[in-house]
Amino acid sequence: MTLSRVQTPGRRCLLLFSCLALFVGLFVGLFGMVIPGAVLRAEPPTADDWPCWRGPTHDGQASAGQVVPQGWGDAEHVLWMVDVPGRGNGSPTVVGNRVYLATCDEATGSQSVLAFDRATGKPVWTRQVHGAGAMRKNEKSTGASATVSADGGRLFITFPNSDAVFCTALDPDGQVLWQTRVCDYAIHQGYGASPLVHDGRVFVIADHKNRGRVAALDPATGKVLWEKERPPAPNYSSPIVWKLFGRDQLILTGCDKVAALDPATGETLWEKEGATTECVTTTVTDGERVYSSGGYPRNHIAAYRADGSGTISWENGERVYVPSLLYSRGHLYAILDAGIAACFDAATGEEKWKQRLGGNFSASPVMLGDTVFATSETGQTHVFRATPEKFEELAVNRLGDESFASPAICGGRLYFRVAVTSGDRRQEKLVCIGER
């Protein structure tokens, strides 16, 4: 007598249920350690996130109300530390329960996006975006110097690869959704312009000596919504949108001018000659002026009226070439590349104070409330008060041996990308600092 001949409808249901239960049990047993941490919420970033280059407000300002340590060391306040494969200068992007980094394997020329668990630092996934073809020239540059931008449901990254710049979108599980070739790219030093998500568009830029391009892409499909040719000059600054004088303005600096475009159409609203040819910094604003800074072929900080006139309110010859400025309560706080902190009156340019910190700086400073965190290329973070009266140092901390990436502050924690060297071996680390 075979089994099928003695089955009743009830027994068949029981058998099906048992098989289903066995399948579910095996699935959970095999993948249960991955599933709980594998899903990023498909919701817009919150105040507890750091979703893009320069943070939630795009100006290096962390959300108010957080409390983070001002002092730390190799063990003190280090919640976790994890190895990062490859090399990159892009900042940590922190959204939901994930931390994202772009990285480049310089031996093979591959470029990837990495995801780590926000609570533990445990690697979650790696997605290779390009298998070879990474580009860089300057020793301080990398093939992954842009920062991942997130809108809650998608991740966006720009890479220089095979004589072109590409923008790629990934889903929360690291699967590639689309990839758009922005334009040809004649590399000069490197590439570090991060994508910007704003009002249903992804803005990307690739300035170079053979004429670059700025474009707005559809975040769902990668379709080019509009594009515009740029002047023929090498430049590295990221696009930024500010609401000024009642309208959104896409601000672009470098290539010897500051320009404001309509983010919806790409139409030029105003532009003004005077910026340096090569800029790395991203502009900040006081609501009336945008502040440009650069270091080649000349040093300068300049304040441009954003009312359509482009009038230069003031200008000086300070070298703020790589670290971006901070604006707070009527004053600009700058870290000069040569290791000097400075404060200027934002309306007049009057110097309030200067203080030598020592070392060289490439990372942009970040601010929480009235406290500035500025990290040098040797991994020293100077913590000081943002006040125009005088320089007030609060702490000096050390992590690793190198640091070129700007830190992120969110959810009561600081996230650093540093490198540790031992002989000829260089190992990048992602470090989370916070109260235990």
Image: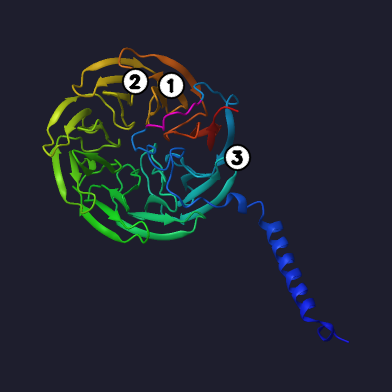
Q: Which residue is mark 3?
A: 120
Q: Residue at x 32, y 32 (%)?
A: 324
Tell me where the magenta segment starts and ends, as one range: 61-68
Front of the two marks 3 and 2: 3
- Circle 2 crowding by C-alpha within 10 Å: few under 14, some 14–19, many from 20: many
Label whose residue precedes the other's in the sequence (2 or 1): 2
Q: Is disc 2 in contact with disc 1, using a CB cutoff of under 8 Å? A: yes
Quarter of the view holding residue 391: top left
Query: Which of 101 and 337 lies nearest the eye of the viewer?
Result: 101
Could you tell me the amino acid type at mark 2? Ala
Q: Which residue is mark 2?
A: 341
Q: Is residue 182 left or right of residue 33?
A: left
Q: Residue at x 43, y 38 (%)?
A: 47
Q: CA distance from mark 3 to mark 2?
A: 34 Å
- Circle 3 crowding by C-alpha within 10 Å: few under 14, some 14–19, many from 20: some
Quarter of the view holding residue 24: bottom right
Residue 64 covered by magenta stretch: yes
Could you tell me the amino acid type at mark 3? Thr
The outermost residue toward the front is 10
